[in-house]
Amino acid sequence: MKVFSQIFKSRLSTDGIFYAQIKKLIGYSPKDIALFQEAFTHSSMNRKNKHGATLNFERLEFLGDTILASVVSDFLYEKFPQAREGRLTKLRSKIVSRENLNSIGKSLHLTELMESPKNIKNMGSDVYGNLLEALIGAIYLETGFDKCSAFIHKKILSHHLDLDHLDRAVLSYKSLLVEWAQKNKKHLRFKIEKDAGLDPDINYSATVVFDSKPLIKARDHSKKKAEEKAARRAYYKLQIDS
């Protein structure tokens, strides 16, 4: 327990490795390193503050999600003065989508800063986006909206944003597949089952049933991800068949 306490204190030290990594990442010397410690603490650590409240990145993630959406909305409003509300909404959804944020968080190597007893391989890809949003939340609390906005522009909107690619990207293959089936009067449904395979991180399987026959099956750790994976495979298979 004493060793664990020493490790925790070293992460809060202004001359420690964690402090130096955070400083390099955010581009300034943080005044409240404990805030960033919280942003990179996984819930599986079961840590609490002196008041007994849970201490992990989830609350900061919630805050960062809201700040990010506001900054991206302002960015798109200024960049596309002629765009209608519908296109702006779709672009914002793609920029702040879990897949895009996961990709950015991974490119920034955010999990290398995370404190968790679990292996990153067993957490799924969403942890990258979660940490990115928590980091944004921490920066906002420490510096305010303007400087946090500047960080988002520099780290996300300037270096990790391909608008042409996002404009063409598919946000939900399931939605596309359902719309296609309705338009073409095809009977399509998703069959979800618990998955009892050998991989403990795979919890569900989704089967796309097309005209009463199983078409494609996919597995993942959540119902939503299994459905989306199956829908993507079915979408391309039906295009090939046609």
Image: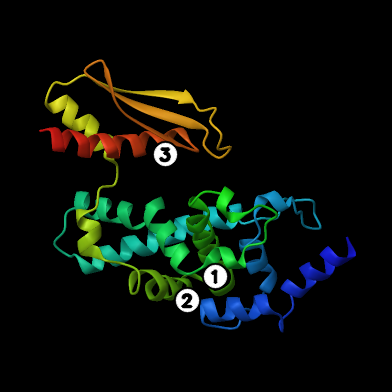
Disc 3 versus disc 2: distance between alpha carbons? 34 Å
On screen, residue 132 versus residue 3, left or right, reads left
Considering every residue shown, the one lying at the far front of the view is: 198
Q: Give the label, 1 or 3, closer to the camera.
A: 3
Q: Tag 2 or tag 3, which sits nearer the N-term?
A: 2
Q: Quadrant of the C terminus?
A: top left
Is there CB contact under 8 Å for labels 1 and 3?
no
SS at circle 3:
helix
Q: Which residue is mark 3?
A: 225
Instruction: Tell me the tag on residue 230.
Output: none
Instruction: Tell me the tag on residue 147.
Output: 2
SS at circle 2:
helix
Which residue occupies the foreground of this view, 42 or 31? Answer: 42
Residue 143 location (% of width, % of height): 55, 74
Q: Give the residue at x 59% y 72%.
A: 142
On screen, residue 178 versus residue 146, left or right, reads left
Q: Tag 3 or tag 1, which sits nearer the N-term?
A: 1
Amino acid beneath label 2: Lys
